[in-house]
Image: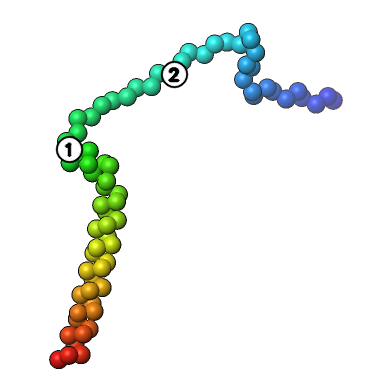
Amino acid sequence: MSRQKKKRTKKYQGVDAKVTAPQVLRVSAEERSRFKEWWLTYGQVTRLAAIALGILLVIILLVVGIVGMFQG
């Protein structure tokens, strides 16, 4: 018994290869307000800054509360 020949899975790219149709990329536009445009540009930085500020405020409140407990 002879072994079965492997099938070719690679596309043929020779000179006489079949030309494929170009792919069409469809794009849609969206009307954005000034705030929406700003948020898309700086939103991640703003979120990180707000989180850092919130953590800082919580730490300050804890320190003030602990100091207030010991002072009287």
* Left or right position of 18 against 72: right
Residue nearest the viewer, comparing 46 with 23: 46
Q: How many neighbours does mark 1 have within 10 angstroms: few (below 14), some (14-19), or many (20 or more)?
A: few
Q: How many neighbours does mark 2 have within 10 angstroms: few (below 14), some (14-19), or many (20 or more)?
A: few
Q: Quadrant of the N terminus?
A: top right
Q: Residue furthest right?
A: 1
* Location of residue 14 in the rendering, given as x and y in whole percent from the top left corner: 65, 13
Using the image, determine if residue 50 lies above or below residue 55: above
Q: Which residue is mark 2?
A: 23
Q: Earlier in the sequence, mark 2 or mark 1?
A: 2
Q: Which residue is mark 1?
A: 34
Q: Secondary structure at mark 1?
A: helix
Q: Secondary structure at mark 2?
A: loop
* Left or right position of 43 against 26: left
* Residue in the picture at 68% in, 22% down: 8
Residue nearest the viewer, comparing 22 with 45: 45
Using the image, determine if residue 35 lies above or below residue 17: below
* Left or right position of 33 against 56: left
Report which quarter residue 40 is drawn in.
top left
For residue 59, which numbered disc appears in the image?
none
Q: Residue furthest left?
A: 72
* Contact (Cβ within 8 Å) of mark 2 with mark 1: no
Amino acid on which the number 1 mark rests in the picture: Arg
Amino acid on which the number 2 mark rests in the picture: Gln
- Could you tell me how far apart the alpha carbons at marks 2 and 1 are, in whole angstroms? 34 Å
Using the image, determine if residue 33 lies above or below residue 15: below
* Location of residue 46 in the rendering, given as x and y in whole percent from the top left corner: 25, 52
* Residue in the picture at 27% in, 57% down: 49
Using the image, determine if residue 28 lies above or below residue 46: above
Question: Which is more foreground, mark 2 or mark 1?
Answer: 1
Report which quarter residue 33 is drawn in.
top left
